Amino acid sequence: MNPRLFPEAMVYSKEMRMPHPIQYQGSKRGLAPLILRYLPSKMERLVEPFAGSAAVSIASAAHGRTKTYWLNDFNKPLAELLGLIINHPGELAEAYREIWSAQKPDSIEHYYQVRERFNRSHDPKEFLYLLARCVKGSVRYNTEGLFNQSPDKRRSGTQPDTMKRNIFGVSALLCGKTIVSSYDYRDVLANVANTDIVYMDPPYQGVCGDRDSRYFTGISIADFVAALSDLNRRDVKYAISYDGRTGQKTFGERLPSHLNLAHIELEAGRSTQATLLGRDAITVESLYLSAPLSEEVGASSIKYRRKSIDQMQLLEKETRYAKVSKRVS
């Protein structure tokens, strides 16, 4: 991104708020700082086969942790949107302003018109508006692969100036060092090297079953485990956000023990529903580390305990690789 062509472009600094143009339910934006503690302090390339909002890569770039990035998502309009954010921020910001400004006087009808156009054209610029305006940033498709989420009637979506700052912020972090693709995740994993660090956030089995409405096709658990076994055979370092629990309710089964993964539980805070109902139910998400990665960063399995002061101190302790040597059972 040339600052002479885009004088409004920002140079990201650590004092600035982390930029995130894409409002995406299930994004690891809030957990990204914790996830980074279990990744190496310096990475040659960070690969996200299920990129989504690319929250972990954005956080890594903000802290200067990685030289290059590979962002992939099977949702092609989402992958194309990431490419526009990174490589054509000015064009995208102006397109968003135009679409957003046209929603007056009837913003609900305007949303449905944009949604109908998007389902015909798959234009990533229109997709950005839908993501900013739809209910809870929740991407939903019907069985025909058409985006069918409703608009949030309480809000008009991200203001154009705010969206512009977020778009240029991400571009400043990732432009010139990121490739973006829209392949099947298995094709990505087949082409990573053992010098890469792979972070995966696939659909949770317990949430979506055999098909996730964020994707046009299902994710086979058996195929996913087979792909992980192949990464183990090739000594590829990887981390996976996979299952979780809220209170006594669990989402998805743990990944099989034969993969020899370190299982770490991270507190994600209270769910939106629990907050609305006044319940003290903490959401805990699992992070799995491959054996080569857990050995490199010095991490072992940790089970979350609400009242475990020792565990929280371990999570907060600043070390080069966020080493964790004490096992909490």
Image: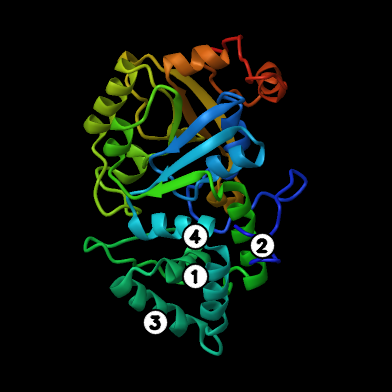
Give the camera-side residue of 127 and 326. Answer: 127
Please name the amino acid that badge 2 sits on: Arg
Please name the amino acid that badge 1 sits on: Tyr
As helix, strand or loop, the secondary structure at mark 4 comes to helix
Please name the amino acid that badge 3 sits on: Gln
Cα distance, mark 1 to mark 3?
12 Å
Query: Vertically, is 77 above or below 210?
Result: below
Residue denoted by label 1: 129
Residue denoted by label 4: 137
Residue denoted by label 3: 113
Looking at the image, tell me whether mark 1 or mark 3 is earlier in sequence order. 3
Residue 23 visible to an observer of this rendering: no
Label 3 environment density (alpha carbons within 10 Å; few <14, some 14–19, many ≥20): few
Cα distance, mark 2 to mark 4?
19 Å
Numbered marks: total:
4
Task: State which mark lies toward you, 4 or 3.
Answer: 3
Give the camera-side residue of 231 and 175. Answer: 175
Q: Residue at x 61, y 27 (%)?
A: 37
Label 4 environment density (alpha carbons within 10 Å; few <14, some 14–19, many ≥20): many
Looking at the image, tell me whether mark 4 or mark 3 is earlier in sequence order. 3
As helix, strand or loop, the secondary structure at mark 3 comes to helix
Looking at the image, tell me whether mark 1 or mark 4 is earlier in sequence order. 1
Q: Residue furthest top?
A: 326
Residue 8, position as x, y percentages in the image: 70, 66
Cα distance, mark 3 to mark 2?
26 Å
Quarter holding residue 238: top left
Do tag 4 and tag 3 residues touch (Cβ < 8 Å)? no
